[in-house]
Structures are given as C-alpha cells and as structure tokens.
Image (cartoon, rainbow, N blue to C red):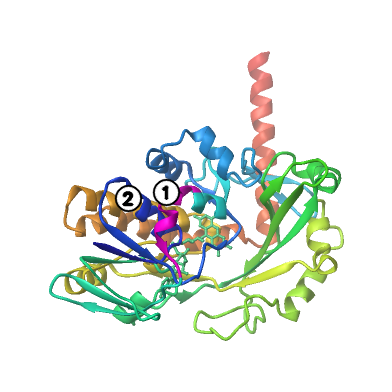
Amino acid sequence: MILIIGAGMAGVTLARHLDSRGIPFRIFEQQTEFKNQGFGLTLRADTTQKLLPLLGLQEDAFGKSVAVDRRTGKTNTFLVDVETGARFAAASFKEGASARDWRTNRERLRGVIMGGVAGRVEYGCKMASFGSTAEGVRVVFENGMEVDGRILVAADGVHSDIRSTLLPRCVPRDWDGVMLNGTCRFGVAEWEEKMAPHVGDAAVYPGFADQTVLAITIYDADWDPVGGFVDVSWGYSRRRRVGHDALFVRYADRGFDKASAPAAFWDEIAALPEGLVEPFRTVFKGMKERGDRTIHHQLVSLLVPKDELLSKLQSDRVVFIGDAVHDWSNHAGTAANAAIQDALALGEVLERGEELEAYYEERYSAWLSSYEKNGEDFQVLHRPIGEWKSLLDQQKSDREEVEVKRNVAQL
Ligand SMILES: Cc1cc2nc3c(=O)[nH]c(=O)nc-3n(C[C@H](O)[C@H](O)[C@H](O)COP(=O)(O)OP(=O)(O)OC[C@H]3O[C@@H](n4cnc5c(N)ncnc54)[C@H](O)[C@@H]3O)c2cc1C
C-alpha cells in the first residue's frame, strides 16, 4: 500500500497513475473538501504530452476542458512596456517557453487529472505524525486514524511537515522578491469594451516597469453575452528593495496575514505612473475602488540535497514529490509542471517495480537546473527600466537590419 499525503497537483497525479495501473494506494488531504488552490497555471508542452496518455484525452478535448478562457488559453509571446505600449519578444529569454505552452484553470485541471480517483481522496485527514514499522511506515492523523503502508509519499507542499520532521535543516530560503496578486471580474460586455481591444484573444498579458512586472491573466470565463463574465487574476511583482522593504515577507514569518495587503502596497499602486497604457490602467488603477481580493505571497527557493533524500528513503521509506522537495519562484512557471512530472516518474518506477532511487536519478538533474536557473529568470524579468529600454532599442535595430536584408534580397 502506497500512502500519499497531500492531494495537490503532485498527489492527485500520482493517485491517478497508480489507480490506472492497479497499484494499491490511499491519498489523504487535510482540507475538508475539494477546494480551489489558486487561479491559473501555465502548462508546458512537455508536461501536456506526458499527461495526455494517462488521462486518455486528445489535446483538443483536454484543452477545451481546462483552458482558462474555455477557448485556447493562449499565452502572449511578448511583454509590454506599461508606459509606452512597446512590445518586447519574451520567448527569447524564457528558457523552455514554447508557443504550445498554455494557460490552464487550476481547479479544472486538478479535477480533470483526478478523474475517477476524486472519490478516493480522504479529506479532513491531516497527518499528525509518522514512523517506521517492520513492513514500512505508519501514519497517525489528527482525527485519530492510524494507517500502515509500504511507502510514504510526501506530496504535502512547500510547508511539508514530513520534510521538516525528517530534514529539519532543509528550510526554504527567502527569495529576494515581492509578489502580490489579486482577482477581479468583468462582465462580458465590459470585457469586450475595455479589455479585448488591447489583449485580443490572449489569456496572459504581461507588462514591465522598472524592476517590476505587472501581469494580467484570465483564470476563468463564461462567454454568455448576457450573464457571462471574465475572471482576471492580476500580479504585481518586483525585486526586493535594498534596506527596509515593507512588502518583503520571510518564510519564517508565519504570522503575516497573506489575505490582507499592507498599506505600503496600496501606496505603490497609487505611485504607478499616471500614464499607464491600457489595459494596465483599467486593472491596476481600478483595484482599490473595485475592492479586489488580494494575496500576498511568500517567495522561497528550495531544493533538498540528493544524498539527504536517498538516506531518508533507506531509513524511513519516505519519498518526496512536488513542492515538498523543490520550490522556486512562480515566475519560472515550472514548479507545478515539475510536480506533475515527478508524480508521473514515480508512478512509472513503482509500476516497473524498480528501487525508488531510480526516481531520484531520473528527476534530480531537472530540479537542479530549474533551481539554478530560477534566480536568473527572476532578475531578467524584473530588470531596471534602463536595461529594458536598451533591449527594445536592440530589438528595433535587429528588425530594421532584417528588413534591409529582405529589401536587398528582393532587388
Ligand atoms: C501565484 C502562483 C502562481 C503559480 N503559477 C505557476 C505556473 O504558472 N506554472 C507552474 O508550473 N507552477 C506555478 N506555481 C507553482 C505551483 O502552484 C506549485 O508548484 C504546485 O501547486 C505544487 O504542487 P504540490 O502538489 O507539490 O503542492 P501543493 O499544491 O501545495 O499541495 C500540497 C497539498 O498537501 C496538503 N497537505 C499539506 N500538509 C498536509 C498534512 N499534514 N496532511 C494532509 N494534507 C496536507 C495541502 O492541503 C495541499 O492540498 C504557482 C504558484 C503560485 C503561488
């Protein structure tokens, strides 16, 4: 019996895989019912290709059921200067980004991945403790239930109790950045009038300012012309400021209220340039008046050393997947993709009956490269405005050069 703690993206993917192969498992979730765990999520083309055979779906059908806009979930390939509207081609520096990446609604994606195993998630089961037995592991839950299994899978996310019990020294590092996001709703007519002329059919519309990114993304939509709506999740992120930074949150600071944006955030929003181009003006200058719900994120970075993972596998029969073992800035847009791919890789190792070390052998190098690349990606996206302007100038002169060459070739 495989015991999975956590029914996030990693846990449910593994459960679905094990179920499809007839491998006995149980999956436990501390939440009392299926709840939304966020808004949108960019699914990379390689993750989609790996998931489809498990789900038994064609890409089109899968796309329609999980795309944020219930259409294509198209991601823009450029970032916009929020003061001038100039566009900078983004794919050139976002490693691994592909035109086939697309934006999914998290709730619907998790639901589709769960499929028939939805009824097997044991909700209201918060793991309280665990330990080794002669045959494997025993887990005790806060509700008093005790369960024995052969292997314990830690799919319990970045605040993993399993990791902090077994590996107390492996604590996520604070990330030198700040991020808040929030949500608002447009009626379909209002969307068509104020937003569509600017964003077109894209579901993701990012912009840049000095060391700051303003992002607008759709996370759900109902296109009924009368009662329909377009739900937007906006993001405000920037580099951490030198000295005191009122928006910077440390991982250790569990006391802060993530649902309440500090006054300093509203001051920063008020200080955004008056001349913001649309649709940034509508979304960012209107958020206080609309009363948008906000979420203040703790940004962290984590990768548990491989030798520690192998040692806990031997001594405790515990294997880690997803954010419980690695985490990096969500700007990389890859952490949930890695979580899904971890679950699929572990499922295959279990299916083949191999030693679980093979799972770490397969996944660790990919984690390491994302972890190392993480810092660079964040810095690159949150450049000083002077660097953005030089890049725009360079892009313009490259285009002119191509144009001249084309004209010469036509002569
Ligand atoms: C704003 C934002 C945007 C993001 N965008 C992207 C993106 O575009 N692309 C991308 O790839 N990634 C993105 N990410 C990262 C992504 O959300 C995570 O990598 C992913 O959710 C990790 O999945 P997981 O299953 O490992 O962990 P989680 O989703 O955290 O799931 C862990 C589960 O374990 C449960 N649990 C915890 N402790 C216990 C316990 N003691 N007992 C029982 N259950 C327990 C929790 O309730 C939870 O359901 C984003 C993150 C954020 C914050």
Q: Position of residue 21 (x, y in %)?
A: 27, 46
Residue 133 appears left or right of 306: left
Q: Residue at x 66, y 75 (%)?
A: 259
- The residue lying furthest to the top in this view is 411
Q: Position of residue 151 (x, y in %)?
A: 23, 65
Measured in 3D between alpha carbons, the distance from the residue under mark 1 to the one under mark 2, in whole angstroms, is 9 Å
Residue 68 appears left or right of 358: right
Q: Quadrant of the N terminus?
A: bottom left
Q: Looking at the image, which is closer to me, 223 or 320?
A: 223
Residue 65 appears left or right of 286: left
The stretch in magenta equals: 112-123
Does the rendering let one see residue 170? no
- The residue lying furthest to the left in this view is 134
Q: Position of residue 81 (x, y in %)?
A: 74, 52
According to the picture, the residue beneath numbered tag 1 turns out to be: 116
Picture layout, residue 268 above or below residue 207: below
Q: Position of residue 176 (x, y in %)?
A: 55, 73
Q: Is residue 114 magenta?
A: yes
Report the magenta stretch's main SS: helix
Badge 2 marks a residue whose secondary structure is helix
Q: Residue at x 19, y 48 (%)?
A: 352
According to the picture, the residue beneath numbered tag 2 turns out to be: 19
Q: Name the amino acid type tagged 2.
A: Asp
Q: Looking at the image, which is closer to me, 186 or 372?
A: 186
